[in-house]
Amino acid sequence: MNRREFLKRSAISIAAVSIPKWTKTAEDISAQIKPNILWIVAEDINPQLGCFGDPNAVTPNLDKFAREALRYINCWSTAPVCAPARTTLITGVYPTSTGAEHMRSFIKMPSFMKMYPQLLREAGYYCTNCAKEDYNLEKPAEIWDVSSKKGHWRNRPSGKPFMAVFNIEKTHESQIRKRPHVLKHDPAKIKLPAYHPDTPEVRQDWAQYYDNITEMDEIAGKYLKELEDADLADDTIVFFYGDNGGGMPRSKRWPYNSGLNVPLIVRIPGKFRYLAPKDYKPGNATERIVGFVDFVPTLLSMVGVKPPDWMQGHAFMGKYEEPQSYVHGFRGRMDDRYDMVRSVRNNRYLYIRNYMPHLIYGQHIAYMFQTPTTQVWKKLYDEGKLKPPQTFFWEPKPPEELYDLQADPDEVKNLAKSPDHQAVLQELCKIQQEHALKIRDVGFLPESEMHRRSENTTPYEMGHDPKKYPIDKIMAMAENASSLKPDDLPQLKSGLEDSDSAVRYWAVLGFVMRGTSAVNSVRDELCSLLTDKVPSVRIAVTRAFGLYGNNEDLELILPVLEKLASPQGNGVYVSMEALNVIDTLGNKADSLKDMLKTLPRKDPDASGRIMGVSKLLEKILGSK
């Protein structure tokens, strides 16, 4: 050991241990030294790295790092898109519980909750973030010591352990379509997933995705070298991970394994090996299931702090380690498009529950349609040139999906109706339902209704109040509505008269999902709901009559949509719900276009993060 290393380690020991070291064992001393923690985050990638066995990936730095670390091959980002995924990371609570599930929203957090940098700073850490935040939750003041491009562990006060986050944007979805680009990977050698068509555009995008991964690897290597050059590698636990699934369409934004499975590589130095899980061995891989909701409890567990009871994740290393058998994912509003999907997996099977199966997978999202793959994929579908499974993305969804991730890694062979798989289907369905009830999933409320019920409180606290949110009966109606079973029609009809607006909302959608004959069977009941006191219910009826009614029905609903379309007065969430229906109606709603041209594009009372009204108007009016 050289003099520099001796002095550095001695200083750490003296600072961390308050009684003479000869009265302690080596393990006792180590337990009182707090590890530094470094997170290196790459945007929009699946485990498509050399160290995870991908033959297309050129990632020498991360491959070397993995030989010194443990690879988690079953890590889920909890959400398949950045903002809710990062919201999960910062709190250790499901966004479906806090109300922060929708892409680019802005939700108040209960006063008793704290973001993890606050908790680590209370534990004596210097916390920096360089530099992306993108949380869907309103931040308390000063959660980081520094959160900017200047954030770096090297600026920490003397004697303080650090928690530092570095975000790498090179692999972001937007970089896949950046042109001009000179390819380094050969497009002809890329193995395409079964759901993508084989075209030059698709191969170009995939090759560029892998080029970006190689460049990202170089940046990650620099962060690792910085740590080594400062002689801090032996004092620092390092996480490398992706922030959500890859940026190619049907990965990012979708709660399949392709949208949620991210690489996680964790290196634990020898002196902190007592914090490692039992399956930790440098160079090895583990099939243990972990998710982003578990990261904060794990951080706290590593520094000896018991995770608070309000956290919904479970530590996967450290003093308070709790192994789990399942991991959960979700999909809510993506930019301006509403949907509700929940997913859960064990070590082999993935179960998906589509609560809005009448909506196609590939709803138009302007940002996603900038990618050449999306454009050519949709064009080929519209021209009738595709066959299953490449057609599935542009078609309505089944209520349930089940995939064997070992036999079908592309997730294109739905086993939900397979007689041989009913036991695992029922197992995972039950786990998903129990999870929703346990965390009080507020996603069963339309977004506008969630905010209305949360007035003067927070969505989380509203969701945990049975009087404000009777989740049992609301969820039951959502299950009936989206089952698509004819036998559920009597329950749906009864739900149209329920005292709870969310039950009425799901009952209406249940008839929408079943089409013309179902809607016509309750025409009078639906007409009466066009004056419902809750906008979401009225908007659901306009969808029913707009798609499956007659000209007389159309005359009834257009004034309702006209009244609810503006974000001013109605609020941005009601406006987005109404504009989604107007867009769905196409030329049936042409008489509203002159009015739409005059609409304000923003709600002055809403957060600037929510830009869906503008995007919807651009789509409907065909201009920017």
Image: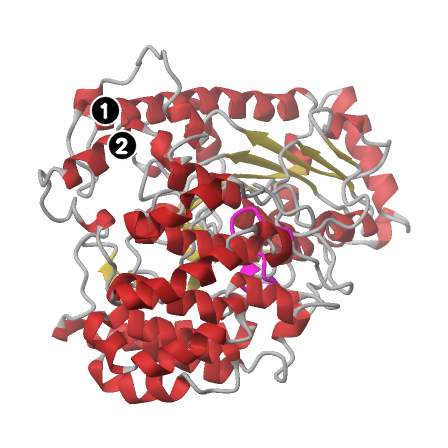
Q: Position of residue 609 (x, y in %)?
A: 61, 42
Describe the element under mark 1 as helix, strand or loop.
helix
Instruction: Give 569 or 409, whichever is nearer the viewer.
Output: 569
Instruction: Report whether 99 appears left or right of 536.
Output: right
Q: Is residue 465 above or below residue 275?
A: below
Residue 617 versus residue 66: which sits nearer the camera? 617
Residue 461 part of the magenta segment: no
**Kind of residue sitting beneath label 1:** Glu
Position of the N terminus by quadrant: top right
Q: Secondary structure at mark 2?
A: helix
Residue under circle 1? 201
Label 1 Cα crowd, 10 Å radius (few <14 / some 14-19 / many 20+): some
- CA–CA distance between discs 1 and 2? 9 Å
Q: Earlier in the sequence, mark 1 or mark 2?
A: 1
Whether 361 is drawn above or below 130: the answer is below
Instruction: Please identify the dominant SS of the magenta region.
Output: loop
Task: Name the residue: 46% across, 71% down.
Answer: 537
**Mark 1, mark 2: which one is toward the viewer?**
2
Question: Measured from the top left, where is residue 142 in percent x and y?
Answer: 81, 43
Q: Which residue is mark 2?
A: 375
Per the rendered image, the range of residues in magenta is 95-106
Q: What is the x, y in percent for residue 129? A: 69, 35
The number of discs equals 2
Q: Which residue is found at the position 51% from the left and 45% from the top?
A: 612
Q: Farthest right residue? A: 19
Which of the two residues, 543 or 370, is positioned nearer the viewer here? 543
Image position, residue 520 (x, y; %): 24, 77
* Label pair 1/2, CB-CB below 8 angstroms: yes
Q: Which residue lies at the image location 58% right of the left edge and 56% below the top edge?
A: 100
Residue 508 as seen in the image, left or right of residue 455: left
Q: Amino acid at mark 2?
A: Gln
**Picture quadrant of residue 581:** bottom left
